[in-house]
Image (cartoon, rainbow, N blue to C red):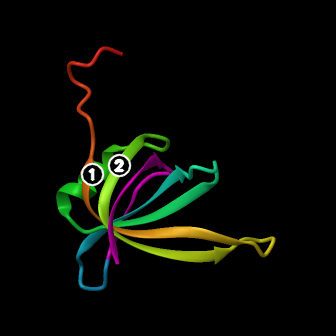
Amino acid sequence: MIDGLVAGRLYGEAERRTDKAGKAYTLAKVRASTVEGEVLFINVIAFDEGLCASLHQLRDGDSVALSGSLNPRVWTDKQGNARPALDMVAHRLISLPLSGIEQ
């Protein structure tokens, strides 16, 4: 795995799930753009309770930056083209507090 930082926009809403042992975790998707303008989807899983709560406060389209362990992979679209994707085990949500910032 690779430690990395990913920035993009939340794609859909974060989803709370529970494993067979009863431990809660959160799944989310982040949509990011490459330098070439291609769209890259990052599949995110988070286990930390505080991080999960923060992800659930975000809404579809909100900007987000996450750090964690990345696992690159390739998937095939309906036209048979190979597309890049990333799976991330998120450890930290990086955000800028909006208080005190003029909008």
- Left or right side of 82 for 71: left
| Residue nearer the viewer, 5 or 53 | 5
> x, y percentage for residue 58?
36, 44
In the image, the segment drawn in magenta is 1-18
Residue sticking out furthest to the top: 102
Type of residue at label 1? Answer: Leu
Quadrant location, the N terminus: bottom left
The magenta stretch spans residue 8: yes
Quadrant location, the C terminus: top left
Distance between the Cα atoms at labels 2 and 1? 6 Å
Q: Earlier in the sequence, mark 2 or mark 1?
A: 2
Q: 10 Å neighbourhood of mark 2: few (<14), some, or many (≥20)?
A: some
* Disc 2 and disc 1 in contact, CB within 8 angstroms: yes
Q: Is residue 57 above or below residue 101?
A: below
Residue corresponding to mark 2: 65
Residue corresponding to mark 1: 93
Q: Residue at x 23, y 32 (%)?
A: 97
Q: 10 Å neighbourhood of mark 1: few (<14), some, or many (≥20)?
A: some
Count of numbered badges drawn on the protein: 2
Q: Residue at x 59, y 69 (%)?
A: 84
Q: Residue at x 24, y 85 (%)?
A: 21
> x, y percentage for residue 34?
56, 52
> x, y percentage for residue 26?
34, 64
Type of residue at label 2? Answer: Ala
Q: Residue 90: which quarter of the image? A: bottom left
Mark 1 element type: strand
